Image (cartoon, helix red, strand yellow):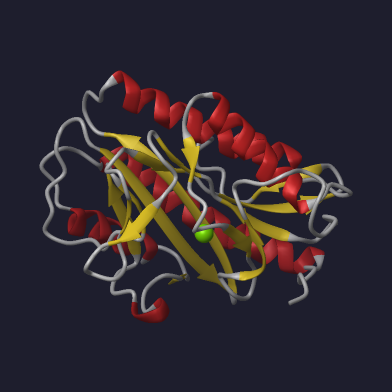
Amino acid sequence: MAIIIKSPDEIAAMRQAGRVVTAVLSTLAREIKAGMTTAELDDIAVRELAKYKAGASFKGYRGFPASLCVSLNEEVVHGIPGERVINDGDIVSLDFGAFVDGFHGDAALTVGVGSIRPEAKRLLEVAKGALEVGIAEAKSGAHLSDISAAIQRYAESAGFSVVREYTGHGIGRNMHESPQIPNFGPPGEGPVLQEGMALAIEPMVNIGGWETRVKGDRWTVVTADGSLSAHFEKTIAITRGGAEVLTPWDES
Ligand code: MG
C-alpha cells in the first residue's frame, strides 16, 4: 500500500488531533496514583476528551472496549482498563488516540507510580531515548528503516531488547496507514521519507527478551519472560525542517 502524502491543510488538522492527545495524556500522567484502578484512568481520558470536539480512536477499534490502553509492568501494549489496582512501584503505559475533523493522533508514554526500582527507572529513560533517536532520523530523504535501526541500536546498546511483533505506523484519516515502522532492522531500507508523511513512531522496549505473547483476554500483550516493558510513542509529520512532533506530551 502506498504511503499517503498529506497537504499542509491536512497536517494542520492532524495538529489539532495531536493537541487533544497531548492534553489527555498530560492529564493522565499528572493524575495517576497508587490505589486507582485502570478503569479510573479510562474514565479520566473520556472526561478530558469531552472538552474537545474529538473522538476516541481506539474505542470500538476491532472491538476494543475502551478509549485508553493501560498496560502495567510486564504488559507491553493493548491492556484493557478494568478493576486492576495500580500499586506503588508499578510502571504504567498509557496509549491514547483521538480524531478531529477526520484525522487521527496517536501517542503513548510510560510513567512510574510512586517509587520505582532503579532498573525500571532506567528502562523508562532508555525507551524514551529510543523514541527520540528514532524521531531524529525521520527527515526528508532518509530511508524509513533509518528510524528502525536507530531505535534498535539505542535500546540494545543499553542492554535491553525491542519488541518485534508490533510496530509503528503511518497515520492520517486512518489510525493505521502504510508504512509499518519496525523498531529493529538495518538502516537504509524501505521507502524514502518525504514531506507530508505522517508517522506514529512507537518503540516498545523490554528489560529481558523481545518475545511477547497475548493474554487470554485476546488483547493484552505481555513479555514472554515476564520482564518489565515500556512504550513511548509520538505522532510526527515530516516537514521541510525535519520531524514536527504533533503530540508533544513531554513539553506541555
Ligand atoms: Mg500507535
| Image quadrant where one finds the N terminus | bottom right
Judge from the rendering whether residue 134 lies leftward or rightward of residue 218; answer left or right. right
The x and y percentages for residue 64 are 33, 74
Residue 198: quadrant of the picture: bottom right
The x and y percentages for residue 47 are 29, 61
- Residue 214 vertical position relative to residue 241 in the rendered view, above or below: below
The x and y percentages for residue 163 are 48, 48
- The residue that appears at 52% across and 70% down in the rendered structure is 99
The x and y percentages for residue 36 are 14, 47
Q: How many marks?
A: 0
The one nearer the camera, 124 or 174, is 124
Residue extending furthest toward the top: 118
- The residue that appears at 20% across and 30% down in the rendered structure is 89
- The residue that appears at 30% across and 51% down in the rendered structure is 71
- Residue 36 vertical position relative to residue 77 in the rendered view, above or below: above
Judge from the rendering whether residue 205 lies leftward or rightward of residue 141; answer left or right. left
- Residue 80 vertical position relative to residue 245 in the rendered view, above or below: below
Judge from the rendering whether residue 134 lies leftward or rightward of residue 37; answer left or right. right
The one nearer the camera, 43 or 38, is 38
Residue 40: quadrant of the picture: bottom left
Residue 55: quadrant of the picture: bottom left
The one nearer the camera, 111 or 154, is 154
Judge from the rendering whether residue 6 lies leftward or rightward of residue 155; answer left or right. right
